[in-house]
Amino acid sequence: MNLFSNIGALELLVILILALLVVGPERLPQLARDLAKLLRSARRAYENLSRDLGPEIMSIQKTTDELRSSVESIRTIPQEMVSSIVKAADLDETVADLKGVADEISHTQQTVATAAKIVSHPVGATVDAVRRSLVPAQPQKPEDVAEGPAPETVDDAGPKP
């Protein structure tokens, strides 16, 4: 610890001249001795403090170095591994596929129900199909065409639900 490392010779000379003018030539040597004692005691206090706290500071520094190395090791995980984990955990496509399968199963159930109705009551199903074909289709408004479902049609197998 060097207090005067940034003070050049010219600055030191200016300080001494100012001290001589402010304090006077009689008290300047005593002031210099007191200043030297103060600097020595401050240096001893600093050395004692660093000697007493040195092991604790070194322990803290060692712990922070270990934490830094742990963080660095985590940062070095290959990016491909992270992306594959994220991709494996992404279930959006799987959910969409399952919804599509559920819709297909629902459509198949409706088709089977319609076929069962036709098989169990062939005359009633034929009468319903003829009635639907005789009722004229109502013209739809332009906003209904854009927003509404497609009009129902009757095919050879029977009415669609």
Image (cartoon, rainbow, N blue to C red):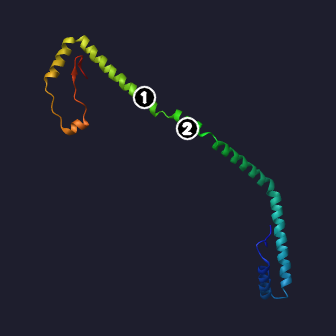
Q: Name the front one of labels 1 and 2.
A: 2
Q: Is residue 29 left or right of residue 62?
A: right
Q: Secondary structure at mark 1?
A: helix
Identify which residue, 25 or 82, lies in the foreground.
82
Q: Secondary structure at mark 2?
A: helix
Q: Quadrant of residue 155?
A: top left
Rendering coords of residue 140 (x, y %)? 18, 35
Residue at 81% from the left image edge and 61% from the top image edge: 49
Q: Quadrant of residue 28?
A: bottom right
Q: CA distance from mark 1 to mark 2?
A: 22 Å
Residue at 45% from the left image edge and 34% from the top image edge: 92
Screen quadrant of the N terminus: bottom right
Rendering coords of residue 139 (x, y %)? 15, 33
Image: 20 above or below 97: below
Identify which residue, 85 or 120, lies in the foreground.
85
Return the mark for residue 160: none
Image: 88 above or below 72: above
Three-letter amino acid code at disc 1? Answer: Asp
Q: Is residue 125 left or right of residue 47?
A: left
Q: Disc 2 marks which residue? A: 83
Residue at 18% from the left image edge and 37% from the top image edge: 141
Three-letter amino acid code at disc 2? Answer: Ser
Q: Disc 1 marks which residue? A: 97
Q: Is residue 117 left or right of residue 72?
A: left
Residue at 62% from the left image edge and 39% from the top image edge: 78
